[in-house]
Image (cartoon, rainbow, N blue to C red):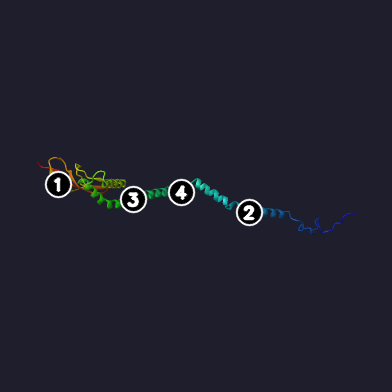
């Protein structure tokens, strides 16, 4: 049996008033498709602009691998400050060590003076117990950096000798140490005590 077509309706069953208003429009799917593309493009744009953890790590690695001139300047400054700090620390440590050593040695200087006077007067008998103790004490203070000076015949030096008496002598052409009343001492390069000496000076005749 042949199908009956109802007047006023198209094949899709949509009423047709003859004006074409009932016919589905092809522009509608196109508009929807365009809207979907715009939304997808917007979504892609958001994903492209989003900063990931890997991006941050990559940027940090590039910064470490290629330090800027500002970072290099900071590194040089910190290195120089640390070097200066080490120099100051070492210098202060050396000064403090010398100060403490000097305090210890100054206590022993009167004992060394007694040993020197005993030796000068012949009271320091070789191989005696007193001589052995004196030798050990002198060796100990020498290891601390203490050195004695002041010997008969040395040229007189006012920076290290203290003249307690002047004695004219025809045997000398310049001021010379004629006798040592008290030995002088250096601790390293520091003068602890000047030597007290009798100075022989050239006589006028």
| Residue 144, image x, y percentages | 31, 47
Query: In the rendered view, does 75 fall on the left or right side of 128?
Result: right
| Residue 112, image x, y percentages | 25, 49
Q: Which residue, given by chain and number where applicable, does mark 4 sit on?
A: 71
How busy is the neighbourhood of tag 4: few (under 14 within 10 Å), some, or many (20 plus)? few
Query: In the rendered view, does 33 fall on the left or right side of 108?
Result: right
Q: Which residue, given by chain and number where applicable, does mark 2 sit on?
A: 43
Q: Earlier in the sequence, mark 3 or mark 1?
A: 3
Mark 4 vs mark 1, CA separation in Å = 69 Å
Q: Quadrant of the N terminus?
A: bottom right
Residue 159 in sight: no
In-front residue for pair 84/22: 84
Give the SS element for disc 1.
strand
Mark 4 vs mark 3, CA separation in Å = 39 Å
Mark 3 vs mark 2, CA separation in Å = 73 Å
Of marks 4 and 1, the one in the foreground = 1
Give residue 166's mark.
1
Q: Which residue, given by chain and number where applicable, does mark 3 sit on?
A: 97
Q: Residue drawn 15% across and 44% down?
A: 200
The answer to whether marks 3 and 1 mark residues whose Cβ atoms lie closer than 8 Å is no
Query: In the rendered view, does 191 fall on the left or right side of 22?
Result: left
């Amino acid at each position: 049996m042949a199908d009956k077509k109802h007047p006023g309706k198209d094949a899709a069953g949509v009423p047709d008033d003859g004006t074409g208003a009932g016919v589905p429009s092809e522009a509608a799917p196109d508009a929807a498709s365009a809207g979907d593309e715009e939304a997808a493009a917007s979504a892609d744009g958001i994903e492209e602009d989003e900063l990931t953890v890997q991006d941050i790590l990559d940027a940090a690695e590039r910064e470490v691998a290629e330090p800027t001139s500002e970072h290099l300047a900071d590194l040089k400054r910190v290195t120089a400050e640390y070097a200066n700090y080490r120099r100051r620390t070492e210098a202060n440590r050396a000064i403090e060590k010398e100060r403490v050593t000097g305090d210890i040695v100054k206590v022993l200087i009167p004992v060394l003076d007694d040993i020197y006077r005993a030796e000068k007067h012949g009271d320091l008998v070789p191989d005696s117990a007193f001589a052995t103790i004196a030798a050990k004490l002198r060796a100990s203070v020498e290891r601390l950096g203490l050195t004695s000076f002041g010997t008969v015949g040395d040229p007189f030096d006012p920076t290290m000798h203290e003249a307690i008496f002047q004695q004219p002598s025809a045997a000398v052409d310049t001021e010379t140490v004629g006798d040592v009343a008290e030995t002088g001492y250096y601790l390293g390069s520091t003068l602890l005590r000047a030597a007290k000496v009798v100075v022989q000076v050239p006589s006028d005749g």
